[in-house]
């Protein structure tokens, strides 16, 4: 409905689950064929933030990225 109305539609693909990897991949391909733009949760949150100069960037890092991203949440092994 949104695509038919002319809206851009982004699917946050790494937050969705399926009964198998094949089912997930087939569903992803069907969405792409229909015009959905695939993205990740981190891309979505980062685009909502718009800029690291945002006053809430520190809170986002502390409360979201460091807890849910292996890249940002890595700790010094020492």
Image: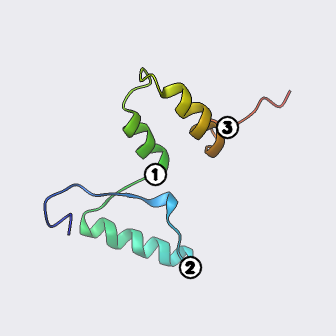
Q: Quadrant of residue 61?
A: top right
Mark on residue 40?
1
Alpha-carbon span between mark 1 and mark 3: 17 Å
Mark on residue 19?
2
Image coordinates for residue 24, horizontal then vertical, percent: 48, 72
- Residue found at x 18% / y 56%: 7
- Residue found at x 62% / y 46%: 68
Query: Badge 1, how many Cα within 10 Å: few under 14, some, many 20+?
Result: some
Quadrant of image for the C terminus = top right
Alpha-carbon span between mark 2 and mark 1: 19 Å
Quadrant of image for the N terminus = bottom left
Query: Badge 2, how many Cα within 10 Å: few under 14, some, many 20+?
Result: few
Q: Earlier in the sequence, mark 1 or mark 3?
A: 1
Image coordinates for residue 9, horizontal then vertical, percent: 27, 58
Query: Badge 3, how many Cα within 10 Å: few under 14, some, many 20+?
Result: some
Image coordinates for residue 20, horizontal then vertical, percent: 57, 77
Q: Which residue is label 3 attached to?
A: 73
Q: Is residue 37 above or below residue 44?
A: below
Secondary structure of the residue carrying tag 2 is loop
- Residue found at x 46% / y 51%: 40
Q: Is residue 19 above or below residue 38?
A: below
Left or right: 30, with 67 as reference point: left
């Amino acid at each position: 409905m949104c695509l038919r109305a002319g809206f851009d539609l982004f699917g946050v693909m790494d937050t969705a689950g399926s009964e198998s990897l094949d089912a997930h991949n087939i569903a992803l391909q069907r969405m792409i064929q229909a015009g959905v733009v695939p993205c990740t949760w981190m891309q979505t949150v980062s685009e909502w933030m718009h800029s690291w100069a945002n006053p809430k960037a520190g809170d986002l890092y502390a409360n979201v990225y460091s807890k849910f991203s292996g890249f940002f949440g890595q700790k010094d092994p020492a």
